[in-house]
């Protein structure tokens, strides 16, 4: 395992020399601030930059949105200290869903934040209190990528709060609305800072490659596309101005990007299932997607060489296979 992790780190350095791979707790401050009240920390799982963001809200009360992976816990702690956050003043850690790269880091440093409560979808709370089963499932689905993220620690039940749809989290001079956004996962919520139009969609809005201005599907092996479309529509109706992507970073023109993502999902769904009906192999599916999705074409080399996304690409495609089709993509003959 150590050899594989070293290989992934070296691969990232080789393919992305302009992206530093570092074990240091480097802080990335968000340049798209909400009255100076939102900062971004790059959690850098296993030193991989520009992939996993944790957002720090600095109202009268402090809060985090997302908790990063367990492997980024030390970087998260260092980043919080570097931007001058008093850990005792953190009131909430708002988690969009319980996939292990979204809360494991906060779970390991929760003792450093004695007043913080963790907010997540009600369906995820049992797994956060006892993550053993979730961890086994994560390893089964993600393989060695799970070890890049690391295993979360249990969170005491008394520190967990269910995130109910429509719930308002009051930070004094900031109010965060909870929006249930199912589809990517059955335990997914998004968060919306209403005064500034700032949206924190977790993976309901896909993944964003800022340098390429491209969007990539964020789909696990099992998704419910109908629910995901409903969730995207809910977010569009909010008319947000800025999206703060967990993967990765802030982006303006939020409504436009949400519409682009909905269109991308439809392209991928129809294309992949058309290919399966024709018994086309994985390489043929990739070729068809590049023909029909300009975002994927622009980002393909980035995806293919990325030490996490590249290894998950087949699994991402698998998520679009509708009921009635084989669960296996035909191998190249």
Image (spheres, rainbow, N blue to C red):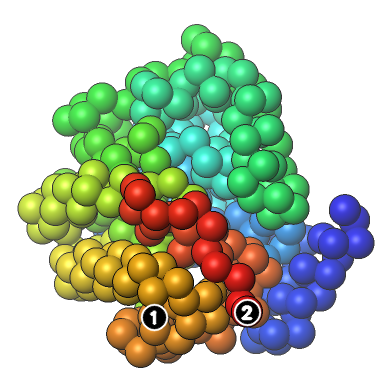
First along the sequence among labels 1 and 2:
1
Q: What element carries label 2?
A: loop
Q: Residues within 10 Å of mark 2 (few under 14, many from 20)?
A: few
Q: Can see residue 56?
A: no
Mark 1–mark 2 distance (CA, rounded to whole Å) = 20 Å
Above or below, 28 relative to 190: below
Extreme-right residue of the structure: 3
The residue to which callout 1 is attached is 289
In the image, which is nearer the foreground, mark 1 or mark 2?
2
Q: Residues within 10 Å of mark 1 (few under 14, many from 20)?
A: many
Q: Which of 332 and 256 is in front in this view?
A: 332
User: What residue is drawn where x is 72% and y is 63%?
Assistant: 47
Extreme-top residue of the structure: 158
User: Residue 63 appears at what percent x and percent y?
Assistant: 42, 37
> Is 260 on the left or on the right of 39, as rendered?
left
User: What residue is drawn where x is 76% and y is 84%?
Assistant: 14
User: What residue is drawn where x is 61% and y is 77%?
Assistant: 332
User: Residue 90 appears at what percent x and percent y?
Assistant: 48, 32
The residue to which callout 2 is attached is 333
User: What residue is drawn where x is 74% and y is 48%?
Assistant: 147
């Amino acid at each position: 395992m150590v050899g594989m992790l070293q290989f992934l780190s070296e691969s990232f350095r080789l393919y992305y020399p302009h992206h530093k791979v570092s074990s240091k707790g480097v802080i990335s401050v968000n340049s798209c601030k909400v009255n100076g009240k939102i900062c971004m920390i790059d959690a850098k799982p296993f030193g991989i930059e520009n992939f996993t963001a944790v957002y720090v809200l600095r109202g009268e009360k402090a809060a985090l949105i997302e908790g990063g992976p367990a492997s980024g816990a030390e970087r998260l702690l260092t980043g919080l200290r570097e931007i001058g956050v008093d850990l005792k003043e953190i009131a909430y850690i708002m988690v969009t869903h319980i996939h292990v790269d979204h809360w494991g880091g906060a779970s390991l440093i929760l003792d450093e934040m004695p007043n913080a409560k963790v907010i997540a979808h009600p369906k995820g709370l049992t797994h956060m209190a006892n993550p053993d089963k979730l961890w086994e499932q994560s390893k089964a689905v993600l393989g060695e990528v799970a070890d890049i993220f690391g295993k979360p620690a249990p969170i005491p039940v008394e520190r967990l709060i269910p995130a109910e749809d429509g719930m308002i989290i009051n930070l004094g001079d900031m109010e965060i609305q909870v929006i249930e956004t199912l589809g990517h996962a059955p335990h997914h919520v998004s968060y919306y800072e209403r005064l500034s139009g700032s949206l924190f969609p977790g993976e309901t809005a896909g993944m964003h490659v800022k340098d390429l201005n491209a969007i990539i599907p964020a789909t696990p092996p099992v998704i419910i596309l109908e629910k995901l479309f409903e969730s995207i529509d809910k977010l569009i109706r909010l008319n947000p101005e800025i999206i703060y992507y967990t993967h990765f970073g802030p982006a303006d023109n939020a409504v436009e990007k949400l519409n682009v993502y909905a269109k991308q999902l439809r392209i991928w769904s129809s294309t992949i299932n058309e290919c399966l009906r024709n018994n086309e192999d994985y390489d043929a599916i990739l070729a068809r997607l590049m023909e029909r999705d300009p975002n994927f074409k622009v980002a393909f080399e980035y995806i293919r060489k990325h030490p996490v996304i590249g290894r998950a690409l087949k699994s991402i495609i698998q998520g679009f296979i509708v009921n009635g089709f084989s669960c296996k993509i035909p191998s190249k003959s």
